[in-house]
Image (spheres, helix red, strand yellow):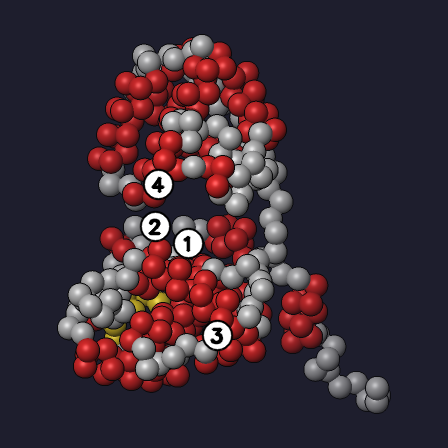
Amino acid sequence: MDFKRTQAQYMEHCRSRHLRPRTLISYEQTLVLFALWMEQTHGVNQVEAVREAHIRQYILDLQSRGKYTFCSTDGGKNHPQSRRDYQQRISNITINNYLRNLHVFFAWLMEMEYITKSPMKRIRALPEERKPREYLEDDEVKQLLRRLDRSYFSEYRDMLVILLILDSGMRLGETLSIEMSQLDLHERCVLLPADKTKGRKSRTVYYSDKTARELRRWIQFKDRYCESDYLFPVKQHGRKVKISVFERNFRQYVKRVGITKHITPHTLRNNFAKRCLMAGMDIYTLSRLLGHSSVEVTEKAYLDLTDRDIKTKYRRFSPVEGIYYGQDD
């Protein structure tokens, strides 16, 4: 069977499983680019003709060429040459994402009996060299929050979004989707229903007394200017804020404060995780709060502590430090 036909069937299968839009886009982009590469490089357009050697050559090609140098529409309207990261090295993490998508696709082909053997069977993930995540120090967090002007609806709203992510570890999309019915100010928690979480599982996240007081003030302010079921609406029409809009605003706030680190809204979630670990929270509890599918996912994502972090954490747990044995230092 040709690639186009099987891709169309596979994407229909994925949509029937109600996968996230971003997941569907990732699957489709991976398959379109791989099919184009197979046709242009090897003249192959049948899925049953794909061999392990093709996959290994594709990996080598991804490693040798830069980002956006191979497009399904020769650049089209996206103008890849204008991107800041054009021709930069494709990371092993990105290549592994492609390989995972291909693994799933060829497994589906076997399940449908379109092929008898998967060319991905012996393909293993590449080693991933993770860079330490950027971390906001206490003073940087204070500067960021203080420089937002509460007299402006959007900046006051965005300040509370930042505060709530820092205090609860929610993803940005989850935070912007909060409706008033999900918020429990008495118990200081937010119920995230399954249809609004990445893992399609409902969970409850919590926040502090200080954040609860700020939320009460924000809600009183919000209700004077906007009728909306959302906790963090757009003032003009009451609908939820788009992720891209908040990300743009956030970049402006970071620039205003003068923070030169590469900081994104997701950095706030990372900060929550690291601060919890440094305070002694166990990895299982942290994994539940973050909404990860397993503890292993949490360990892989957030256990990149620096030497200074380890030194600080050690001093809190030193077995000898708290033992008096009759001698002065």
Q: Which-is-in-front pick, marks 2 and 3?
A: 3
At label 2, the amino acid type is Gly
Rendered-image quadrant of the N terminus? top left
Q: How far apart, in angstroms, are the residues tagged by discs 4 and 3?
A: 32 Å
| Quarter occupied by residue 234 | bottom left
Sequence-wise first label, 2 or 3: 3
Q: Mark 3 — residue?
A: 144
Taking depth in this image into account, of 41 and 301 the one nearest to the observer is 41
Label 4 or label 3, whichever lies nearer to me, is 3
Quadrant in which residue 211 is drawn: bottom left
Label 3, label 1: how many angstroms apart (C-alpha)?
A: 28 Å
Q: Earlier in the sequence, mark 3 or mark 1?
A: 3
Disc 1: which residue? 292
Residue 289: where, in percent of width, then height? 40, 63
- How dense is the environment of label 1, judged by Cα within 10 Å: few (below 14), some, or many (20 and up)? some
Residue at the spot of label 4: 23
Whether label 4 touches label 3, CB < 8 Å: no
Q: Is residue 53 above or below residue 87?
A: above
Q: Earlier in the sequence, mark 2 or mark 4?
A: 4
Asked whether disc 2 touches disc 4, contact meaning CB atoms under 8 Å apart, the reply is no
Q: Residue at x 15, y 73 (%)?
A: 227
Seen at 55% across and 70% down, the residue is 258
Task: Measure the alpha-carbon separation of dots 2 and 1.
Answer: 7 Å
Query: Which-is-in-front pick, marks 2 and 4?
Result: 4
Point out the tag, 2 or 1, that comes first from the N-terminus. Answer: 2
Q: Position of residue 14 (x, y in %)?
A: 28, 34
Please name the amino acid that badge 3 sits on.
Leu
**Real-space CA distance between mark 2 and mark 4, rounded to the nearest whole angstrom:** 11 Å
